[in-house]
Image: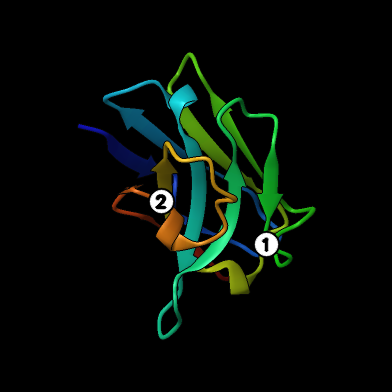
Amino acid sequence: QVRLVESGGRSVQPGGSLRLSCALSGRSISTYRMGWFRHSPGKERVFVATINRNGRGTEYADSVKGRFKISKDIDQNTAYLQMNSLMPADTAVYSCAATEDFVVGTTMAEYDYWGQGTQVTVSS
């Protein structure tokens, strides 16, 4: 049974940084493409970033390009989302997801496993 647990979300001021973690248990993270999505109140959950199985291929939503970086640590069996230059518009519940399939990874339907989410609030 694959389980994903996110952590690292908290309140931060505009311009600040956070690193979110997504710990995968049950199998090796090298088997999975990982993705991050976010959900703001009154809005649909949207794609943020994805990283492929070997960690060498990444893709980002236009809104976070140049500010966020997705990575994975095989030894720690954990995926990360480094978020810099945070803005109030980044306020959301951030969820990680995993799939064994060879997909592009930019839509929710492509993922099989989901974490419970972690709240990020950007406010002065």
- Which secondary structure, mark 1? loop
Which quarter of the figure has residue 106? Answer: bottom right
Q: Where does the image place residue 15, in percent across and percent down from the top left?
A: 71, 60
Q: Which of 109 and 36 is in front in this view?
A: 109
> Would you say 5 lies left or right of 1 here?
right
Residue found at the very far front of the displayed protein: 102
Q: Can residue 118 be seen in this view?
A: yes
For label 2, count other residues whose C-alpha is less than 10 Å away and answer few (under 14), some (14-19) or many (20+).
many
Depicted 10 relative to depicted 81: above or below: below
Report the number of discs. Answer: 2
**Residue at image x 45%, y 40%?**
101
Percent coordinates x, y for residue 102 in the rendering:
53, 40
User: Counting residues from the N terminus, which is met first, the one under dot 2 or under dot 1?
Assistant: 1
Is residue 7 shown left or right of residue 69?
left
> What is the quadrant of the C terminus in the image?
bottom right
How far apart marks 2 and 1 lie (CA) works out to 17 Å
Kindly identify which residue carries mark 2. 111
Say which amino acid is labelled 2.
Tyr
Q: Position of residue 121 (x, y in %)?
A: 49, 65
* Residue that appears at 41% across and 61% down: 109
Q: What residue type is labelled 1?
A: Ala
Per the image, the residue denoted by label 1 is 61
